[in-house]
Amino acid sequence: MKGTMRTIRPAWLIGIGVAVAVLGLIATELCSRASLALPVLPLSSLATMGLIVVVCIFLGLKVRRWRDGRRDKALDALMAARTVVLAQACAYAGAVLLGWHAGIMLDQLPTVSLRAELGVIWQLLTLMAGGLVMVVVGIAVERFCKVPPDDNEPPDNPRIKRDSHGEEEFA
């Protein structure tokens, strides 16, 4: 059995986002009942999110250039593996941030017409956009790091064809 890393599953990202949105909704309700501030990240957290995205793109482009044939230097396999892990972490963290702030937004939507100031709504939308950017960049960089299979390697799960005599033949 070959040791391979699993790729990001969009269904998992959606599931995580929905689950964390429910948690954000519950947390907002609990904070409101206790007369506490909304559990929203400050806008300064966008700087950290942006830094993660920039580093992820930078490392991903290095791997993609090598994959696409610009091989003036050898690719450090450990750096490439770490780039894939960073891309996956970026996507999952983005799903968490997007879901959390979407849950808070769902709680706040009924009160939008009562608000004189919409600063919190814009803050939530901005943080949700930041989470979405992290998800998109994570998925894109993970795809940058996919190496096409060698022509001489058999596929991981070959389809088995049976001929008319009951013997197995690999496609």
Image (cartoon, rainbow, N blue to C red):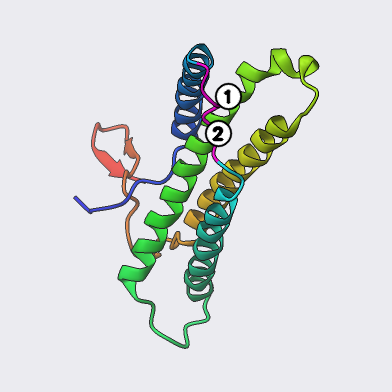
User: Is 95 positioned to the left or the right of 74 in the image?
Assistant: right
Picture coordinates of residue 8 (x, y %)?
44, 43
The location of residue 20, given as percent across then percent down, is 46, 26
Q: Is residue 160 above or below residue 146?
A: above
Amino acid type at image mark 1: Ile
- State the image quarter where residue 119 is shown: top right
Of residue 23 and residue 145, the one placed in the foreground of this image is 23
Nearer-the-camera pick, 33 or 72: 33
Amino acid type indicated by mark 2? Val
Q: Mark 2 or mark 1: name the one nearer the start of the chain.
A: 2
Nearest the viewer among 155 and 126 is 126
Q: Secondary structure at mark 2?
A: loop
Q: Position of residue 118 (x, y in %)?
A: 76, 29
Chief secondary structure of the magenta portion: loop
Residue at image point 58% right, 50% down: 44
Q: CA distance from mark 2 to mark 1?
A: 8 Å
Q: Is residue 43 left or right of residue 24?
A: right
Q: Is residue 85 above or below residue 7?
A: below
- Which structural element holds mark 1? helix
The magenta segment is 35-41
Q: Are marks 2 and 1 in contact (CB under 8 Å)?
A: yes
Q: Where is residue 93 drawn, in percent x and y?
A: 46, 43
What residue is pinned by disc 1?
104
Which residue is tagged 2? 40
